[in-house]
Amino acid sequence: MADFEGRNPGESLESFIDRVVNPDSSYVTQTRLVIHTVADLMRSKSVDHKVGSTVKGGSLGKGTAVKGRSDADLLFVYADIPSIDALRTTLPKLLRELQSALALSKHKVTSVKRTPFTIQFEIEVNGQLNEVDVLPIIQLDIGNWSKAKMNPIYQQMKTNEELREYYFKCLAPLQVEFVSKQDEKIKRSIRLLKYWIKTRKHVLKSYAAELLVIKAYEEMGSPQVGKMKSLELMKTVFTKLSDLKSLTVSWDKYYTPSTYYLPSPPYILDPAFPFHNLTRQKSGIDEKYVHLERDAKKFLANLK
């Protein structure tokens, strides 16, 4: 019978989440401490440009980390880079500076890689390696995240395709805010879905899993979280995963999807970035998603 890996016979889903899925507080605290240490080290070496703030992204920043499987994005918000065009010009130098600073860390750092937009590495915390991405961005001059304020940004992205990826990176704080503000009860189900994806070796991205659970909760009518059981929410999630041809996840809080990009199902659209489908397919439904759908159907039939 299909069940979550490591779940004991007769164990309730809530108990399983507490025992296996939720990270213990000491691990999260220590991981955050190391990330702050690395952030301080890098800020001290960014001599040519001023880091105005550091934002924790990834599952740690959103509050959706799974025990032993945490990742973190460190968003370095530069205060003296005035525009997206200036960021594009300056970014290669910023990445070189950050990589040089990382080499001075007192913590064990391995698998360092520089991409066009980030520094990626693994850092050891209490004997466990944690994946970290360091991402230099700028503060978009919009005042707040309202739909009216965001519209000019999205229009610029629509007409300047070569700048979209830079805008996308700078919208990461909005992605973090969208997920982190969710209730802890919803985050418990997010962690459980992430655990299932990892242990079953499925391809659904972590951010897609977060958005899928949030949408499932909304489609349940946003019930009072105090009265909602994780089992009920997970049944709704697996129902959606069991029918990918009908899977449509989007929001119109910051933009109207049909104005920019509305693909054929399945799709999970980024609420912060109109051109980002987290289940993008080449044509039809990829075999990896067919496997996901089949597995979700088996789990749904036996979920209790």
Image (cartoon, rainbow, N blue to C red):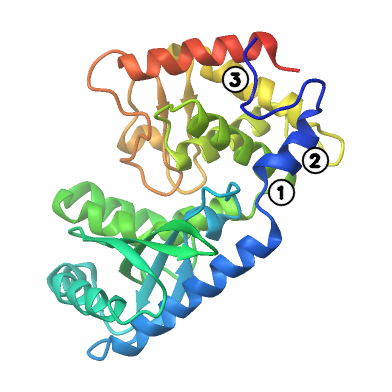
Q: Is residue 73 above or below residue 19?
A: below
Q: Which residue is mark 1?
A: 183
Q: Earlier in the sequence, mark 1 or mark 3?
A: 1
Q: Secondary structure at mark 1?
A: loop
- Cα–Cα span, label 1 and label 3: 20 Å
Q: In this view of the protein, can residue 186 be seen by the observer?
A: no
Residue shown at 58% from the left, 33% from the top: 193
What residue is shown with label 3?
238
- Mark 3 vs mark 2: give the one in front: 3
In the image, which disc is placed on residue 74?
none
What residue is drawn where x is 48% and y is 20%? 247
Q: Residues within 10 Å of mark 1 (few under 14, many from 20)?
A: few
* Residue farthest to the right, as pictured: 227
**In front here: 239 or 264?**
239
Q: Which of marks 2 and 3 precedes in the sequence?
A: 2
Which amino acid, mark 1?
Asp
Residue 13, image quadrant = top right
| Tag 2 residue | 225
Q: How many marks?
A: 3
Please report contact status of discs 1 and 3: CB closer than 8 Å, yes or no: no
| Residue 265 falls left or right of residue 282 | right
Looking at the image, which is closer to me, 155 or 16?
Answer: 16
- Residue 74 lies left or right of residue 18; in this view the side is left
Distance Cα–Cα, label 1 vs label 2: 8 Å
88 relative position to 269: left or right: left
- Position of the N terminus by quadrant: top right
